[in-house]
Structures are given as structure tokens and as C-alpha cells.
Image (cartoon, rainbow, N blue to C red):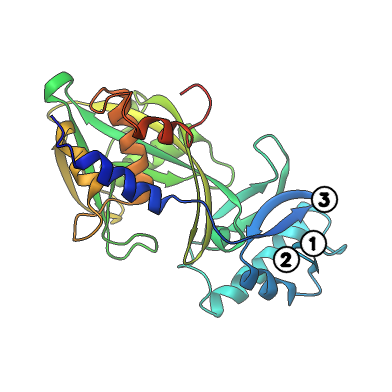
Amino acid sequence: MIEARILPALHARLAALLAPPRESLCRFEVDGALVGELTPARFRRVAEFADLFVAEANHVRFAESCRGLFERTEAMDRVARTLAAEGALSAWRDERYEVRAGPFAPVAFLLERAAARYFGVATQAVHVNGLVDHGVHASMWIARRSPAKAIDPGKLDNLVGGGLAAGSSVAATLAKEAWEEAGIDAALASQATEAGTVHVRRLQPDGLQRETIHVHDLWLPREFTPDNQDGEAVEHRLIALAEVPALLAQDSGPDVVTADASLVALDALIRLGVIDADDPIHPWLAALCGEGR
């Protein structure tokens, strides 16, 4: 039984964390199509690269010299490195994302991951709920992020999570991150089941996070113990599903769960019947989910 105060607190916390931007954002366009969104201050800074961009009113586009994929990518790399030197980006990852005007549109350019939020480009990630047992004994593995992480250092997280780098796929990213973050081998990782998508669009100190998260559930053997391989997780806890809502509701202290992981875990709690489907939090969550949920 979940305490009556827990779900309203959880809903209030996530509604605040995941609230859409209140300020008007400026469009970043390629061939007239939206590929990113900039805060006004970032729009003004980008406009200063006058040889690379044309800024008009509330939108910016590439100059005629940047017509192709290679030229745009080179231009964005130059801008990203300049911004990084100014301290305007999060830590440099030396990893690129593919930027498109839509999920089926061609790649407009490649962009260093650290600059994704600065330009408000659409990104994709894979998260996995690590689950153990079923029914009243079901539990969920929760990881703690390294204090050295560029984003949300030291916070609690899903067992597995990572962004889709250029040229990778959901399946490949899941397998890679499962091994690196939890020591889950490819055979076990392949048993993860797709559970749909959730979407995030919120302003953060480093820009606009505009991300589609591909959610998966992976039922793990009781004897399995996560073993981080890359130093990005420093702790793992196995928590009874009935206790997870109270954890997700915490908004201060050492055991705060990231907004992304909270959303993914909440989705699982509803699907698994821990939180009633008719609870007021359900339609709010459904609005952030993809089709078929």
C-alpha cells in the first residue's frame, strides 16, 4: 500500500521538473525545417558567427556556404569548440549526435553531444528498468551516477541509460550501455523488452533538453548483481517496487532520482500495477508518452 501523501508529492515533483519552457524560444532551421530551439541569449551568441549563420527576427539558419552535411558539421564543430572554450557547454564528450528535422528526415549535420542542449536539438536515449522477480516480491535495481558525471552527478538513475550516438541504433546502444553500466552481457541484454517511449522537453542550465527515451524492461535473475565497467555508476541498490514511489518523490537529500529516470521508473510502476492506472498521475504521464501506450 502506497502512503496517500506519496503520489501527490511525486506528481508535483515531476510536473515541476518536466514542465515545458515558459519563455519563447528561437528557431534553428535547416532548409526551412526546425532542427533546434535556442534561448534568446544563445540565439544572440550564435548570430555572432555571421560567416556561418543568418539570423533574422526569432530564427537562425545556415549561411549559403554551409549547404551540405559535411559543411554544416564542420561549421557546428567550430562553433561548439568555441562555445566550449567559453565555458558555455557541459563537459566535452567527443561523441556526436545525428541532427534531423524529424525521425524520418535525412541527417542535417552531426553535433558534439555537449552542445546538444545548447542548440535544443532532438536527441534519443535508451533506458532500461532492471527488474527482479514478479508479483508482490518484484524489485527494481537503481544505480547511483558517478559524482564525476557531466549531467546529474551523484544522483540515482535507472540501471541502464545512454544516448544514441551517430551511426548507432537502439538495440546496439542498449547492448553497449548494459555492459558498460551494469556488466550485463549481450545474451542477457537481448532479453530486454520494448515498453514504448517517453518524451522530455524542458529548459536546463545548459539549454533545452528535447529527448525521446526508448524505454525497456529487463527481468534479471535473482542471483545477478550489477557490476559497473566504465566508472559511470558507483552504487547499485535493489529496491522493492512498492517502495520505489516514495524514492521517486524525494526532491532533496542524497537520494534524489534524476528526472529522466523518475519518468521511466514511474512508467514501469503504472504498467506493472504498482500505481493504479486510474490514478490522476496516469493521464499526465500518458501525455508524455508515445503512441500505443
Report the amino acid beneath label 1.
Phe
| Residues packed near mark 3 inside 10 Å, few (<14), some (14 to 19) or many (20 plus) | few
Q: Please name the residue that numbered disc 2 is placed on.
A: 75
Distance CA(mark 1)–CA(mark 3): 9 Å
Residue at 42% x, 25% y: name it.
194
**Which callout, 2 or 3, points to the residue nearer the camera?**
3
Q: Residue at (27%, 64%) from the top-left corner?
A: 147
Work out which quarter of the rendered image holds the N terminus and state it.
Answer: top left
Amino acid identity at mark 2: Ala
Distance of mark 2 from mark 3, alpha carbons?
16 Å
Q: Indicate the position of residue 35 as horizontal and vertical percent values.
A: 69, 51
In the displayed structure, 150 sits above or below 96; it is below
- The residue labelled by disc 3 is 31
The disc label shown at residue 62, or none: 1
Q: Residue furthest bottom?
A: 86
The CA distance from mark 2 to mark 1 is 9 Å
